[in-house]
Amino acid sequence: MALHRSRKHSIIAGVCGGIAEWLGWSPVAVRILYVVLSVLSAAFPGVIVYIILWIVMPRAAE
């Protein structure tokens, strides 16, 4: 299974949902982990990484 943005588990862009599908984890767990890591890293790098992933990760096929 390739890494892609999720259509099924999308809240903003589907990045965390796509990562969760790829890892076989709960999308809620990935979102919480991502927010915690972003806050612990002063939030700015987390936002930049999310935007880059939004641009780079392809959208899931329908």
Image (cartoon, grey):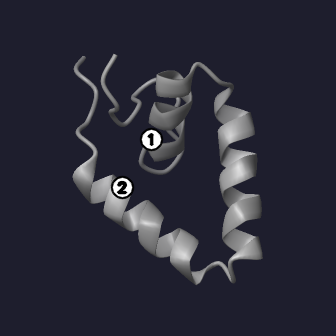
Q: Position of residue 12 (x, y in %)?
A: 49, 51
Instruction: Please state which amino acid type lies under the numbered disc 1.
Output: Gly
The total number of labels drawn is 2
Q: To which quarter of the image does residue 44 belong?
A: bottom right
- The front one of 17 and 45 is 45
Q: Which mark is residue 53?
A: 2
Q: Residues within 10 Å of mark 1 (few under 14, many from 20)?
A: many
Q: Position of residue 2 (x, y in %)?
A: 30, 24
Q: Where residue 54 sits: x, y (%)?
A: 34, 55
Q: CA–CA distance between discs 2 and 1? A: 10 Å
Horizontal and vertical percent position of residue 31: 67, 46
Assign a secondary structure to mark 2.
helix
Quarter containing the C terminus: top left
Closer to the chain start, of discs 2 and 1, is 1
Amino acid at dot 2: Leu
Looking at this view, is 8 or 53 the one in front? 53
| In the image, residue 10 above or below residue 1 | below
**Quarter that holds the N terminus:** top left
Please give the residue where the numbered disc 1 appears in the rendered image: 14
